[in-house]
Amino acid sequence: MTEPRKMPSQTGGLSFFEDMHPPAADFRADILAGLSKPQKALPPKYYYDEEGSRLFDAITEQPEYYVTGTELELMRTIGPELRELAGEGALVLEPGAGSSVKIRTLLDALDSPSAYVGMDISGDHVRSACEALAADYPSLEIGALCHDFTQSLDVAALPLSAKAHAGRRLVFFPGSTIGNFELIDALALLKTLRGWLREGDALLIGADMRKASEALEAAYDDEAGVTAAFNLNLIARINRELDGDIDADGLQYRALWNPYRSRVEMYLVARRDMHFTVGGERFVIRKDETIHMENSHKFTLETFQDLAAKAGLRSRKAWVSAREPFSIHWLEPAGEAC
Ligand code: TRP
């Protein structure tokens, strides 16, 4: 890790902002590689330009998209138990921190947390989200890190107070974001997060559960077409930034439940044969051919706990929501990862 650069004079009420310089993404190379695969695929990390982030927030408000509301309600319900488990003075770390109300719910539930550190691959994003949080929690020590959670992180070296370093580390990873990774990558990510924990620390993680295919397909293909627009926005971005001429009207969005892999798969399907150019390269897509956009894996308590166990994490407690089943897990380090 590079020497932390503290900027105590900055405004915004943050204790620190540190840029750990995550490797720069190569939009052009990644998109061209994805379109060149036998099964065309576009990397989901490019969804989130300004319009994409706006559309994502709108997805979370669609009536069919139960994930966000269900998790938040469950967080509120289990607040007293979380307070008990975490104890006083916890240091809360959030990889992939958004501007979400979930972190506020957690901080409100806890018993005088000592500090909060938000991390995101987008430095601007995490900085403004943490500044907003600092305005609402003036007495909480808050730091922001521009960091890619696939990179290593030495928590003990963060420029936090001795009090914060002495607290129990609680890593918060909500939203069933873990489900958006291929299982092998989810396992690697869990191992990475496991590496941030010492004996007695914990990972608090949300994992959406298997349910009827109708509910799942509706959640990922809402009536108002917001999730479709979110996917097609990436096509617009490619056309704009990579001098592309993909006809978005020739692509239809579809969400499909794959029971064998226990995941919702999101695709753009060609309505007809189309020839197009992106970044100076020519491509063909045939009628009914698909572009794979993203996956959202769904778990049972058992499949998720098995995955966690492989990463060296033992389940201390799991909660499932009353209506659309969604699970939140309190995981603690257990021996070594395999
Ligand atoms: N992790 C959430 C989920 O899988 C949110 C999410 C990520 C999402 N990418 C998405 C929701 C694409 C809809 C479409 O539900």
Image (cartoon, grey):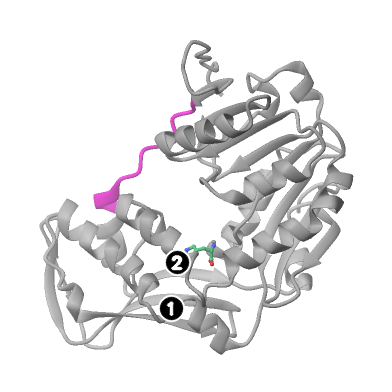
Judge whether residue 310 can be spotted in this image.
no
SS at circle 1: loop
Which range is magenta? Answer: 19-29
Mark 2 beta carbon near ligand 1 (under 8 Å): yes
Write the residue at 50% across / 64% down.
60
Q: Estimate the x, y position of residue 209 in percent, counting from the top left.
A: 67, 74
Residue at position x 85%, y 51% from top? Answer: 80
Residue at image coords 66%, 63%: 71
Residues at circles 1 and 2 in contact by the CB criterion of under 8 Å: yes
Name the one closer to the observer, 259 or 240: 240
| Residue that carries the numbered disc 2 in the rendered image | 59
Alpha carbon distance from label 1 to label 2: 8 Å
Q: Position of residue 131 (x, y in %)?
A: 51, 30
Q: Which residue is at the front of the view, 263 or 132?
A: 132
Looking at numbered disc 1 in the image, what kind of residue is underneath it?
Asp
Q: Which mark is residue 222?
A: 1
